[in-house]
């Protein structure tokens, strides 16, 4: 079974808060992409696969979408309570356990809400269950179904006769299919959804009682560690096991192809063994110089996709009143989860259980079965939450590590990666270069927009059949998905804009169908995927943040060139009313003062301040955000300090406004970190940003100069629910960059805007 | 291996362990505590924070033998979901978490500062948090929660 996002989005319904990340490989992502699902032993077309009512009236709901801190546990519980008309306390949600939950692929790409809150999945299951129960009650009470009322699982008829859910079904199966016509409760009827329900995990988290995957303990469990190669591309050449023989508690040194690990009775013993084990490695493949990396990826043979091409771009550029051209660069960045990735596996001769923080329980089950040489039916993956992942961190790879080590010793093994193993080998957010060209007419309108990008890519989510897309699979001998150079064919499909490769201001016309959100009709969107020396994968707003930085910065350059106000200039080139509304709303919130940039009479010393705006229609139609950033720049040091953020968010009907605000605040500050300091670094052999001194992330002392964040949540209940966890972060780099330009006249085209970089650029002005 | 006595969250434990073992692994693996967590193993992030006596300690780099005489408090030693400590209650009220992996560092560090100096300024609190990381960037809510707790300490 394969359901596309569009299918879900066509339907109407409710919403919430989610983040995650989708395929990084752009328009040519895995044929089996992260949203795909496979047929499993749990039939998603049957109601009993999703919902059960016990004899005591408690409701158990089963979902293939999981919570990793973004609020899905609470929002999905609200959803079930709302549709079933029971109190939230009655609902117990089981997340992504392959023994009992339907296969919903990967929790990523801001897809949990579109998937489960519209007219499919969990929402439709809960609505079906309510209708089935009311129909049973109608029979039992001998009254018409539409005259019955339900409050907290008690059905009441006209004459006051009552029957409870547990009396109707109590612990028996429904034995009915999911009804495509079961009516969702409308936002006007909501009593649980739409309310700022406090996150359900709060008390356990704050008191240290919450069970993370790191806390899973299995009887007889041993501890493992891996020994990764010392250089990228280095192959195993031998091991001296006597180097660790003296370590007490050592159980086994495990070598399989280029995979090396150790297992010991205690964690500290495993750590010491991994550090002291003498492994011989052949030299690595060497790495391209970081200094010239952006230039080098532009010259590499690439796999190309043309999403839009009006075929008159060169002609229009030649005839334009003014032409602007600019190149933007975005670095590799890390997920950098606070806790290193961890998993526990218990592999027996004919079955295996893996406790994993993966976003992809079913795909992980499939890969584990492959790695262990075991039938799929023998493998169970149980989702247990890990440290916030923000996309494909080490959760998948460490699950494979645990399975391989457990199989090698025949006992349950827990493994948690070292900080260096996590940071040197995770699937980074892709480095990317974007080249923009545009032409403006005499009246300051954009006539033509030409976009071209180069994205460095290696591996991705492993999906159901690509172990080599992450480091453990590669070391075990599986290749990552290949990138075969290929010229672009003419666009044939209507524009989807999943990676936000198309700027918001183009019409996006393919074969007469114009899915873009803007007015510019001379347009070209050409993407190149080139091989990356490092693994890459979805990192919160994958490619969308890179592309939006380039689009919204360039739009600011065009606006300045046309001597137009950046807000008015955007509005003039937008057609999508929802995007227009968030831009207006953010500008109103910020009390935006019209200007024709850049600021006149800027100071040359001391501290200057400025404001910038940026907006996005996330993935074309999966959530909308606009952000005004106000920053100060210390001209002597080049230090950029954001002072105020004003953000407007539209994600359709809101399941939980408190969760949405939490995601929006966190997204903006995380985006600020990624805009100002985060960058993966390397030398000629290996990654050099491998701890919190070499990979910078602001500490909690950021509270000393915390920017204020004002949020406007647009209230829309007449559209399908969309994602919300990735929209705000997407617009941060451009909004900050545009504010720096407004403050200083300096246009920064490379992220991050470190003080050194800003200072150097200021002195060159 | 040697026998070590540890006083954790008011309870005395007698353990047979390698004395060089970092305190964190004894707390999480031998005693099954969930509060302190492995983040980096290099005292760079704060996820493993516990209070020893009156001071915050990074348990990932502290050999267990060095703290065998002291009173050790972990995040779960402060309060329970039913009866949270006032600083935990402030974090609950403000919803000051996303994934929650960092909370031992954030809550215990803020508590230690305010216990030592109830009148501590925002500046002093902020500086004390200078080695604590939260990668979900829940900073704004955490600051609100800490200020709220500080108010109850001042009152």
Image (cartoon, coloured by chain):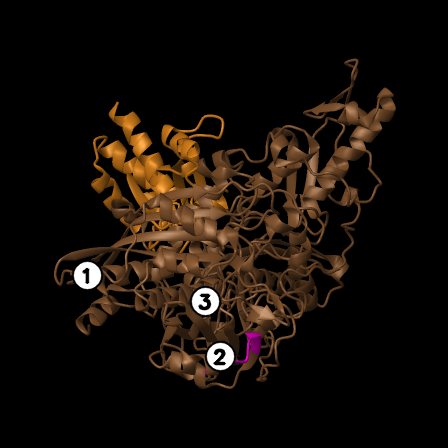
CA–CA distance in space, label 1 to label 3: 29 Å
Q: Nearer the viewer, mark 2 or mark 3?
A: 2
For residue A613, say whether it is visible: yes
Q: Colour of chain B?
A: orange
Q: Residues within 10 Å of mark 3 (few under 14, many from 20)?
A: many
CA–CA distance in space, label 2 to label 1: 34 Å
Relative vertical location of residue A668 with respect to residue B115 in this rendering, above or below = below
The span shown in magenta is A305-314
CA–CA distance in space, label 2 to label 3: 20 Å
Q: Tell which subunit mark 3 falls on.
A: A
Q: Earlier in the sequence, mark 1 or mark 3?
A: 3
Image side of residue A538 versus residue A91, left or right: left
Q: Label 3 belongs to which residue? A: A547
Q: Are marks 1 and 3 on the same chain?
A: yes
Q: Nearer the viewer, mark 1 or mark 3?
A: 1
Dot 2: element? helix
Q: At x 58% / y 84%, what residue is drawn?
A: A487
Q: Residues within 10 Å of mark 1 (few under 14, many from 20)?
A: few
Give me the chain that's brown: A
Q: At x 30% / y 42%, what residue is drawn?
A: B56
Q: Label 1 belongs to which residue? A: A600
The answer to whether mark 1 and mark 3 are in CB contact below 8 A is no
Relative vertical location of residue B131 with respect to residue A27 in this rendering, above or below = above
Q: Tell which subunit mark 1 falls on.
A: A
Residue A335, horizontal then vertical, whole percent? 45, 60
Q: On the image, which quarter does residue A447 sit in?
A: bottom left
For residue A682, say whether it is visible: no
């Amino acid at each position: 079974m394969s359901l596309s996002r569009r299918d879900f989005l066509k339907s109407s319904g409710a919403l919430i808060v989610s983040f995650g990340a989708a395929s990084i490989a752009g328009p040519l992502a895995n044929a089996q992409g992260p949203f795909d699902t496979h047929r499993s032993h749990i039939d998603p077309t049957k109601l009993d696969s999703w919902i059960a009512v016990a004899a005591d009236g408690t409701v158990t709901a089963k979902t293939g979408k999981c919570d990793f801190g973004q609020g899905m546990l609470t929002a999905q519980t609200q959803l079930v309570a709302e549709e079933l008309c029971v109190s939230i306390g009655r609902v117990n949600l089981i997340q992504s356990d392959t023994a009992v939950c339907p296969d919903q692929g990967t929790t990523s790409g801001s897809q949990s809400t579109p998937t489960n809150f519209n007219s499919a999945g969990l929402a439709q299951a809960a609505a079906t269950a309510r209708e089935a129960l009311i129909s049973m009650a109608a029979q039992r009470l001998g009254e018409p179904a539409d005259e019955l009322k339900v409050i907290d699982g008690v059905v009441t008829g006209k004459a006051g006769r009552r029957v409870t859910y547990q009396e109707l079904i109590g612990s028996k199966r429904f034995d009915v299919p999911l009804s495509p016509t079961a009516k969702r409760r409308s936002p006007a009827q909501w009593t649980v959804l739409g309310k700022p329900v406090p996150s359900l995990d709060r008390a356990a988290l704050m008191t240290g009682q919450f069970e993370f995957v790191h806390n899973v303990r299995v009887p007889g469990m041993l501890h493992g560690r891996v020994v990764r190669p010392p250089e990228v591309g280095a192959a195993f050449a031998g091991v001296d096991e006597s180097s660790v023989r003296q370590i007490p508690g050592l159980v086994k040194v495990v070598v399989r192809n280029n995979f090396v690990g150790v297992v010991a009775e205690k964690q500290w013993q495993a750590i010491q063994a991994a550090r002291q084990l003498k492994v011989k490695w052949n030299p690595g493949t060497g790495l391209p110089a970081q200094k010239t990396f952006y230039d080098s990826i532009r010259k590499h043979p690439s796999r190309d996709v043309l999403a839009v091409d009006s075929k008159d771009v060169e002609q229009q550029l030649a005839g334009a009143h003014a032409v602007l051209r600019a190149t933007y660069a975005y670095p590799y960045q890390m997920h950098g989860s606070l806790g290193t990735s961890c998993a526990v596996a218990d592999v027996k001769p004919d079955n295996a259980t893996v406790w994993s923080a993966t976003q992809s329980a079913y795909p992980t089950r499939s890969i584990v079965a492959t790695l262990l040489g075991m039938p799929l039916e023998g493998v169970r993956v149980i989702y247990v939450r890990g440290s916030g992942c923000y996309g494909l961190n080490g959760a998948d790879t460490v699950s494979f590590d645990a399975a391989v080590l457990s199989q090698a010793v025949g006992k349950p093994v827990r493994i948690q990666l070292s900080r260096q193993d996590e940071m040197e080998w995770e699937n980074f957010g892709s480095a990317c270069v974007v080249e923009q060209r545009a032409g403006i007419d005499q009246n300051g309108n954009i006539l033509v927009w030409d976009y071209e990008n180069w994205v460095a890519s290696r591996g991705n989510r492993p999906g159901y059949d690509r172990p080599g897309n992450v480091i453990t699979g590669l070391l075990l001998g599986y290749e990552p998905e290949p990138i075969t150079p290929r010229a672009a064919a003419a666009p044939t499909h209507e524009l989807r804009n999943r990676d936000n490769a198309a700027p918001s201001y183009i019409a996006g016309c393919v074969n007469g169908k114009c899915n873009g959100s803007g007015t510019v009709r001379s347009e070209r969107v050409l993407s190149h995927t080139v091989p990356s020396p490092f693994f890459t994968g979805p990192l919160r707003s994958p490619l969308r943040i890179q592309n939006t930085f380039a689009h919204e910065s360039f739009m600011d350059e065009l606006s300045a060139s046309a001597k137009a106000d950046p807000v008015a200039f955007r509005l003039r080139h937008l057609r999508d009313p929802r995007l227009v509304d968030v831009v207006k709303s953010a500008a109103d919130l910020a009390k935006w003062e019209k200007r024709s940039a850049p600021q006149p009479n800027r100071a040359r010393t001391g501290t200057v301040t400025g404001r910038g705006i940026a907006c996005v229609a996330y993935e074309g139609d999966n959530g909308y955000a606009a952000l005004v950033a106000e920053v100060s720049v210390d001209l002597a040091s080049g230090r950029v300090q954001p002072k105020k953020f004003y953000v407007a968010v539209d994600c359709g009907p809101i399941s939980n406004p408190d969760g949405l605000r939490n995601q929006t605040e966190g997204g903006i500050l995380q985006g600020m970190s990624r805009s100002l300091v985060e960058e993966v670094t390397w030398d000629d052999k290996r990654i050099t940003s491998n701890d919190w001194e070499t990979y910078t992330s602001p500490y909690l002392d950021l509270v000393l100069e915390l920017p204020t964040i004002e949020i406007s949540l647009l209230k829309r209940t007449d559209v399908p629910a969309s994602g919300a966890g990735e929209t705000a972060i997407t617009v941060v780099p451009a909004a900050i960059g545009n504010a720096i330009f407004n403050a200083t006249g300096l246009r920064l085209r490379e992220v991050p805007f470190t003080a050194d970089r800003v200072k150097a650029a200021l002195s060159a002005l | 291996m040697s026998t070590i006595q540890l006083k954790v969250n008011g309870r005395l434990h007698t353990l047979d362990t390698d004395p060089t073992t970092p305190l964190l692994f004894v707390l999480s693996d031998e005693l099954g505590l969930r509060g302190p967590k492995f983040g980096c193993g290099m005292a760079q992030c704060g996820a493993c924070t516990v209070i020893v006596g009156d001071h915050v300690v990074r348990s990932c780099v502290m050999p267990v033998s060095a703290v065998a005489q002291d009173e050790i408090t972990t995040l779960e030693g402060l309060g329970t979901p039913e009866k949270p400590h006032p600083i935990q209650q402030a974090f609950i009220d403000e919803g000051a978490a996303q994934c929650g992996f960092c909370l031992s560092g954030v809550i215990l560090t803020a508590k230690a500062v305010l216990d030592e100096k109830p009148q501590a300024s925002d500046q002093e609190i902020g500086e004390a948090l200078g080695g604590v990381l939260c990668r979900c960037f829940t900073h704004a809510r955490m600051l609100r929660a800490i200020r709220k707790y500080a108010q109850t300490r001042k009152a």
